[in-house]
Image (spheres, rainbow, N blue to C red):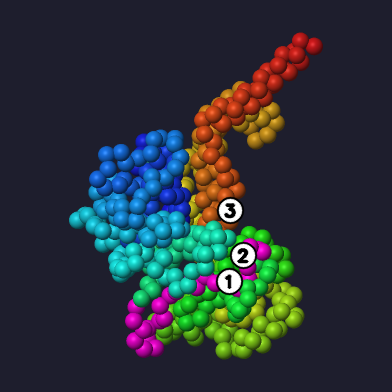
């Protein structure tokens, strides 16, 4: 993931999911045509921003037009204005000096290129489904970001003319069990929903968005990693296998040389996998036990890991270019340890520690988001909290001084 910053005074880091800058209070949104997350002000408003430090988004109406710092005009994706599940923006105008922005087809329903891919969304009359859908959309947009960066086709609406056109991509978010029971109780009359890919359609069982249900499955399957983002990346792997097969005549033979013959019976492979488990020495050749099942799953697992790796490294790279954390300042900051990596307790400077930690925690969270994991440090340290932390810091330093004096005195 790229590093995004607001244009306001302190240039705070914005996460890809941000809908508001925590510093200036302006609305923020992602512009897929330029791959930038930007702050916006409403057009025709004298008081565009919420007061600094006052949380609470400026609540726009469905028809609001917004402009970025350069005056380009946008509207928000209809899935934000109606359901608050998307932070992508649709351009109304571009600037002359914009460098060939990627163009997306227009959409009558006011949906962004990511939301336009939805074929089936969860039943929103069930209140418990709404936050789960939100989780799915967040993971989907992260997955799409990397695919867009790779310039892979993600359009939903091209015409399939013949066998030389890959199928368009679409998503179905469906459930066969009741979200109110963490997906324990079956929904009457619903066919089983299997997470998977077929002919460009990626189906994700809504249960995967429920933390309890997903962890239960992860433990039952003896997996070490199971995330929503991982599911999207894996299933996209199956989709792009179909794309490469259609557009690249050498792909299938080359694939078979590395992964084996995909014509092996999938059902037999599935039965064998769940009866016998993976081969004893699977670690030598496969990235996961699931990858041992069939060449297609090996490809999809490998594809997902490739996206994990390049996205997380991109996150690290963009921070290393734009942040103090991965630099000399962290090597040189004085930490208040009597014993430890540095022994200079006198030089420990709370403000330097705090500045570095705020930066470091954002890097930590961003790296985890790139892996589809939750924030390891989901806290915001406002000034009053920093002052309490400073008090702790000073108390410990005083303790060193006091005990040094009493040692000297005894
Ligand atoms: Zn800002
Ligand atoms: Zn959207
Ligand atoms: Zn698969």
**Residue 83, horizontal then vertical, whole percent:** 45, 58
Structural crowding at the residue carrying mark 1, measured as other residues with C-alpha within 10 Å and reported as few (<14), some (14–19) or many (≥20): many
Query: What's the residue at 55%, 47% (across, down)?
Result: 364
Foreground of the two, 171 or 233:
171
Query: What's the residue at 63%, 71% (across, down)?
Result: 177
C-alpha gap between disc 3 and disc 1: 23 Å
The answer to whether any part of residue 348 appears in the image is no
Residue 175 is tagged as 1
Q: Give the mark, 3 or 1, whose residue is nearer the N terminus.
A: 1
Which stretch is magenta?
158-182
| Of the two numbered discs 2 and 3 in the rendering, the one whose residue sits closer to the viewer | 2
Quarter of the rendering containing residue 263: bottom right
Q: Are marks 1 and 2 in contact (CB under 8 Å)?
A: yes
Q: Give the mark, 2 or 3, whose residue is nearer the N terminus.
A: 2
- Look at the numbered disc 3 and give the secondary structure of its residue: loop
Q: Is residue 261 above or below residue 388?
A: below
Residue denoted by label 2 = 179
Quarter of the rendering containing residue 169: bottom left
Residue denoted by label 3 = 374
| Of the two numbered discs 3 and 1 in the rendering, the one whose residue sits closer to the viewer | 1
């Amino acid at each position: 993931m790229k590093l995004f910053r607001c244009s306001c005074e302190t240039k705070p880091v914005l996460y890809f999911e941000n809908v508001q800058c925590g510093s200036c209070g302006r609305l923020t949104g992602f512009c897929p045509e330029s791959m930038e997350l930007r702050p916006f002000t409403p057009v025709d408003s004298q008081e565009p921003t919420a007061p600094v430090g006052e949380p609470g988004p400026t609540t726009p109406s469905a028809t609001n037009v917004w402009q970025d710092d350069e005056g380009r005009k946008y509207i928000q994706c209809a899935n934000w204005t109606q359901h608050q599940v998307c932070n992508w923006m649709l351009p109304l105008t571009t600037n002359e000096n914009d460098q060939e922005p990627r163009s997306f087809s227009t959409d009558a329903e006011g949906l962004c290129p990511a939301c336009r891919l939805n074929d089936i969304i969860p039943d929103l009359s069930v209140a418990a489904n709404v936050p789960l859908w939100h989780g799915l959309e967040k993971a989907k947009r992260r997955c799409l970001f990397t695919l867009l960066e790779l310039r892979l086709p993600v359009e939903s609406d091209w015409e399939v003319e013949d066998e030389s056109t890959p199928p368009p991509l679409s998503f179905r978010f469906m459930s066969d069990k009741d979200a109110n029971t963490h997906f324990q109780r079956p929904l009457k009359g619903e066919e089983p929903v299997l997470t998977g890919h077929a002919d460009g359609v990626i189906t994700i069982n809504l249960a995967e968005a429920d933390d309890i249900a997903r962890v239960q499955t992860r433990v039952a399957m003896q997996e070490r990693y199971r995330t929503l983002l991982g599911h999207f990346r894996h299933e996209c792997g199956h989709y792009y296998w179909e794309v490469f097969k259609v557009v690249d005549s050498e792909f299938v033979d080359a694939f078979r040389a590395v992964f084996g013959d995909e014509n092996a019976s999938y059902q037999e492979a599935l039965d064998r996998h769940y009866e016998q488990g993976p081969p004893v020495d699977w670690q030598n050749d496969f990235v996961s036990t699931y990858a041992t099942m069939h060449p297609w799953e090996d490809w999809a697992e490998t594809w997902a890991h490739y996206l994990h790796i390049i996205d997380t490294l991109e996150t690290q790279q963009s921070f290393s270019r734009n942040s103090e954390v991965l630099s000399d300042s962290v090597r040189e900051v004085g930490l208040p340890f009597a014993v430890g990596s540095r022994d200079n307790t006198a030089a420990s400077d709370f403000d330097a520690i705090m500045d570095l930690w705020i930066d470091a925690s954002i890097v930590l969270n961003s790296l985890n988001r790139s892996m589809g994991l939750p924030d390891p440090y989901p806290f915001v340290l406002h000034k009053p909290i920093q002052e309490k932390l400073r008090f702790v810091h000073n108390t410990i330093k005083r303790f060193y001084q006091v005990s040094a004096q009493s040692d000297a005195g005894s």
